[in-house]
Image: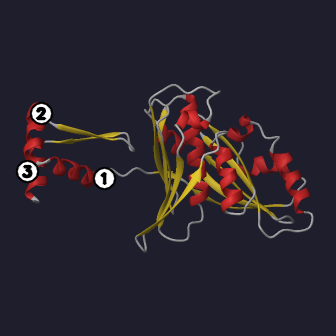
């Protein structure tokens, strides 16, 4: 099951999203060797990227990227308008549960990039990191930048990525604050095993069976990482023909690691002949 579903509290100014992906998530982290803590961070970023991308009205993609000089030097999640996801973590050190996000990432900012393929234009914004974590960071972002008070729950394991988001909508009723406190209090009773095991209908019934909740149709999330061979051929071209042929002679073949897809691309003499014949 690889789905995301929107839901709405029909009598309140509150909406939400529920995410559960298993095989797509397993493909994302397969053979990566990520630690438990790295998987949780990666899951939080990926869940946020999927929720932000869900509902993009144009062809394109949304990218969340964090670079720093901490034990985790790169977190990257990309999601297309039709919810195809890919991403990676670059981690070079040990992370403990006591580490703040600043310690893990080495400070810095989160870059949010929205690319519109129809206009070939990208819009970037920057999100200040809250040392308490990525979840708190994006709760702050939704509240301050989007004017949508939000609460987010994420569980990320080797088997699945599951998350729930609830948001207070801008147009309010007089009793909205009381409603919001009630819904978040109910939401806070969720356990990680429930988040990992229950589908949207079961979870919403478990939490909000006394509320009037409308659950919308699901959208499918897929893992897709196209092997962009042309981009790596350009790397070889930029190396220069003599250096490339010397490297080929020394090693017998040229191997380049496509880190985001966790695949190796191999180039032989015929490949070099073709690459440099374009000059």
Dot 2 or dot 1: first in sequence order is 1
Dot 3 or dot 1: first in sequence order is 1
Contact between labelled residues 1 and 3, with CB atoms less than 8 Å apart? no
Q: Judge from the rendering whether residue 251 lies leftward or rightward of residue 192; answer left or right.
A: left
Q: Is residue 158 visible?
A: no
Contact between labelled residues 1 and 2, with CB atoms less than 8 Å apart? no
Q: Is residue 172 visible?
A: yes
Q: Residue at label 3?
A: 273
Residue at position x 76%, y 47% from top? 203
Q: Position of residue 263 (x, y in %)?
A: 33, 40
Q: From mark 3 to mark 1, how far is it between C-alphas?
A: 19 Å
Dot 2 or dot 3: first in sequence order is 2
Residue at position x 77%, y 47% from top? 202
> Toward which corner of the image does residue 143 lie, by quadrant?
bottom right
Question: Of the numbered discs in the image, which one, if any, rests on residue 252?
Answer: 2
Q: From mark 2 to mark 1, how far is it between C-alphas?
A: 22 Å
Q: From mark 2 to mark 3, how far is it between C-alphas?
A: 15 Å
Residue at position x 72%, y 43% from top? 198
Residue at position x 13%, y 42% from top? 268
Answer few, some or many: residues within 10 Å of disc 1's Cα (few below 14, many 20 plus, some between 14 and 19): few
Q: Residue at label 1?
A: 228
SS at mark 3 in the image: helix
């Amino acid at each position: 099951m690889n789905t995301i579903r929107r839901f709405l509290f029909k009598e309140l100014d509150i909406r939400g999203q529920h995410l559960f992906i298993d095989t797509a998530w397993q493909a994302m982290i397969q053979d990566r060797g990520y630690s438990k803590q790295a998987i949780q961070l990666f899951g939080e970023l990926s869940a946020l990227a999927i929720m932000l991308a869900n509902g993009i009205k144009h062809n394109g993609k949304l990218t969340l990227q964090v670079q720093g000089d901490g034990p985790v030097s790169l977190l990257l999640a990309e999601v297309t308008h039709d919810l195809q996801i890919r991403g990676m973590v670059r981690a070079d050190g040990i992370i403990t549960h006591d580490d703040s996000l600043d310690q893990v990432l080495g400070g810095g900012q989160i870059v949010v990039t929205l690319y519109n393929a129809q206009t070939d234009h990208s819009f970037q914004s920057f999100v200040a990191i809250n040392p308490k974590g990525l979840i708190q960071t994006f709760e702050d972002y939704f509240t301050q930048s989007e004017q949508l008070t939000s609460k987010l729950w994420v569980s990320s394991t080797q088997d699945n990525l599951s998350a729930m988001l609830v948001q207070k909508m801008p147009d309010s009723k007089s009793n909205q604050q009381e409603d919001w406190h009630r819904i978040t209090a109910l939401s806070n009773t969720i356990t990680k095993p429930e988040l990992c095991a229950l589908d949207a209908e079961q979870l919403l019934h478990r939490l909000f069976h006394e509320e009037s909740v409308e659950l919308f149709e699901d959208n499918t999330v897929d893992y897709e990482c196209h092997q962009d061979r042309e981009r790596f051929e350009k790397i070889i071209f930029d190396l220069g023909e003599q250096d490339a042929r010397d490297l080929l002679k020394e090693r017998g073949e040229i191997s380049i690691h496509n880190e985001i897809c966790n695949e190796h691309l191999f180039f032989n003499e015929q490949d070099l002949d073709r690459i440099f014949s374009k000059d």
